[in-house]
Amino acid sequence: MHIAYGKMNLEEDNIEKRKHAPLSNSEAASFFFIPIGFAKISKWENTDFNVSEMARFKKFGFERKIKQASEMRLYGMIFYISITILLTYFLG
């Protein structure tokens, strides 16, 4: 009975660690470089990987990842808007 109790605590600890784990570098990069969804040309259906990842984060209660992913999407949008403004200024 003591072993089962220890195993349950270990599982709960792992769940808590995952809830508070930060985004990995690859996850952060995908939210930064692809901040908006894309639709298939043949169907107007959203195929965005980031939407499914956000849904997964919400489903499992990964609050820290949700916050960081939202920030990375915002920074990515600001990055692309800045690039557009700079290109318009220098090429226009």
Image (cartoon, rainbow, N blue to C red):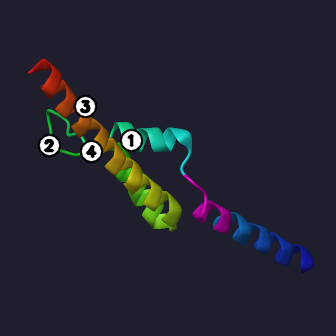
Label pair 3/2, CB-CB below 8 angstroms: no
Amino acid type shown at disc 4: Ile
Mark 2 Cα-neighbour bin, 10 Å: few <14, some 14–19, many ≥20? few
Q: Nearer the viewer, residue 89 or 78?
A: 89
Q: Is residue 53 left or right of residue 21?
A: left
Please name the residue that numbered disc 2 is placed on: 44
- Closer to viewer: mark 3 or mark 1: 3
Under circle 3, the secondary element is helix
Query: At which x and y percent is residue 59?
Result: 45, 66
Please name the residue that numbered disc 1 is placed on: 32
Q: Quadrant of residue 4?
A: bottom right
Can the viewer see residue 40? yes
Residues under labels 1 and 4: Cα distance? 9 Å
Q: Which residues are magenta?
A: 16-22
Direction bottom: furthest residue: 1
Residues under labels 4 and 2: Cα distance? 14 Å
Going from N to C along the chain, the mark reached first, 2 or 1, is 1
Under circle 2, the secondary element is loop
Up/down of 80 relative to 56, above or below: above
Query: At which x and y percent is residue 62?
Result: 52, 63
Label pair 4/2, CB-CB below 8 angstroms: no
Amino acid type shown at disc 1: Phe
For residue 83, which numbered disc appears in the image? 3
